Image (cartoon, grey):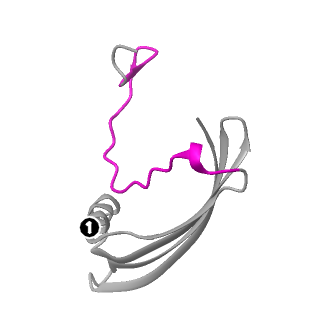
Amino acid sequence: MPNDNILNNNVIPVVAVEFSRPVDVTLLGRKGRSFEFQVGAAERAALARRYSVVSIDRLEAQCDIIPERKGCFRLNGGFTAAVVQLCVISLETVAERVTGKFSLLLQQ
């Protein structure tokens, strides 16, 4: 394609990626692989700006990537974050622990 930002004559917006953990899927093997990581301070600050919170003081994730069928991979994961945001009434800071799980089917 001459311009990767144009698809079917529509402009695709370019979105900044705050953090990324690329995986070479050719090295996974049949059982896949598990990953654990902590997000660095600069990445957390960029995410805090994107989500309009005061700060993200900690962000950790655990992921498993498993081959499913030719060219498809299942990404199962979970995360834990320590987030500081403003109370909408008092405007005082409020610290919260946020957790979540996700499962995505990725295609090459």
Residue 53 within the segment the image draws in magenta = no
Which residue does the numbered mark 1 point to in the structure image? 45
**Residue placed at 35% from the left, 25% from the top?**
5
Of residue 22 and residue 51, the one placed in the foreground of this image is: 22
Secondary structure of the magenta portion, mostly?
loop
Left or right: 8, with 104 as reference point: left
Residue at point 33% right, 18% down? 3
In this view of the protein, which residue sits in the foreground, 48 or 18? 18
Q: Horizontally, is 17 left or right of 66 in the view?
A: left
Residue at left 72%, top 56%? 31
Give the quarter of the figure containing the C terminus: top right
In the picture, residue 63 is in which quadrant? bottom right
Classify residue 13 by image quadrant. Answer: top left
Amino acid on which disc 1 is placed: Ala
Q: Position of residue 84 (x, y in %)?
A: 33, 80
* Vertical arrangement, residue 108 with respect to residue 16, above or below: above
Picture coordinates of residue 37, whole percent (x, y):
45, 70
The one of 14 and 87 positioned closer to us in this rendering: 14
| Secondary structure state at the residue bearing disc 1 | helix
Residue 16 coordinates in the image, percent (x, y): 31, 46
Front in this rendered view, residue 92 or 11: 11
Image height of 54 relative to 96, above or below: above
Give the answer, above or below, for where 64 lies relative to 88. above
Q: Position of residue 85 (x, y in %)?
A: 33, 77
Q: Assess whether residue 20 is covered by the magenta stretch.
A: yes
Q: What span is colored magenta in the figure?
A: 5-29
